[in-house]
Image (cartoon, helix red, strand yellow):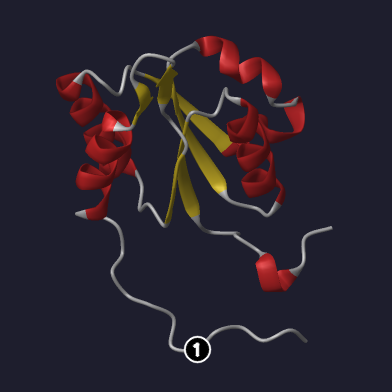
Amino acid sequence: MTSELFSLKGKTAVLTGAGGFFGRYFTIALLEQGAKVILIELSPETQKFFSQEFENRYQSFFVDLYNREAAKECYEKILDANRVDILVNNAFDFSAKTGFNTEAISLLLQEMLQEMPQEMPQEMPQPG
């Protein structure tokens, strides 16, 4: 049961790296709280992790976020059709030689922050 205090109904979240360990849990939590979730992932295999009950509440884009042009085209499609309220930037690469590669996160953040709502809530919701 979704608590109204933590409800995300009417909100749209963009989540990168949805196929990873943490990404799956982030996605399920957002969906359970009522958000529409837009997944940005490399592989269509990601969809197998999400049950039929969420079928109409998420949308997937399969794109290599390290390809700047492909990523920008993906962001434009998302922003043309959606107001993005939440960004969960979970995509990264790890290599024993180079460590964490956060270039994809930086590119997404630069693009999305330009379009995300800038207003802040007037007051924080209080537990009832």
Which structural element holds mark 1? loop
Residue 117: x and y in percent read 31, 64
Looking at the image, the residue that sits furthest to the right is 1
Looking at the image, the residue that sits furthest to the front is 97
In front of the other: 83 or 22: 22
In front of the other: 100 or 17: 100
Quarter residue 111 falls in: top left
At x 67% / y 86%, what residue is drawn? 126
Quarter residue 102 falls in: top left
Left or right: 94 with respect to 73? right
- Near mark 1 (Cα within 10 A), the count class, few <14, some 14-19 or many ≥20, is few
At x 67% / y 67%, what residue is drawn? 6
Marks counted in the figure total: 1
Left or right: 48 with respect to 74? right
Residue 66: x and y in percent read 26, 21
In front of the other: 57 or 85: 85
Residue marked by disc 1: 123
Query: Which quarter shows the N terminus?
Result: bottom right
Left or right: 65 with respect to 43? left
At x 69% / y 34%, what residue is drawn? 54
At x 24% / y 26%, what residue is drawn? 71
Badge 1 amino acid: Glu
Residue 83: x and y in percent read 35, 53
Left or right: 53 with respect to 11? right
Residue 88: x and y in percent read 47, 45
**Residue 81 vertical position relative to residue 84 in the rendered view, above or below:** above
Query: Which quarter shows the C terminus?
Result: bottom right
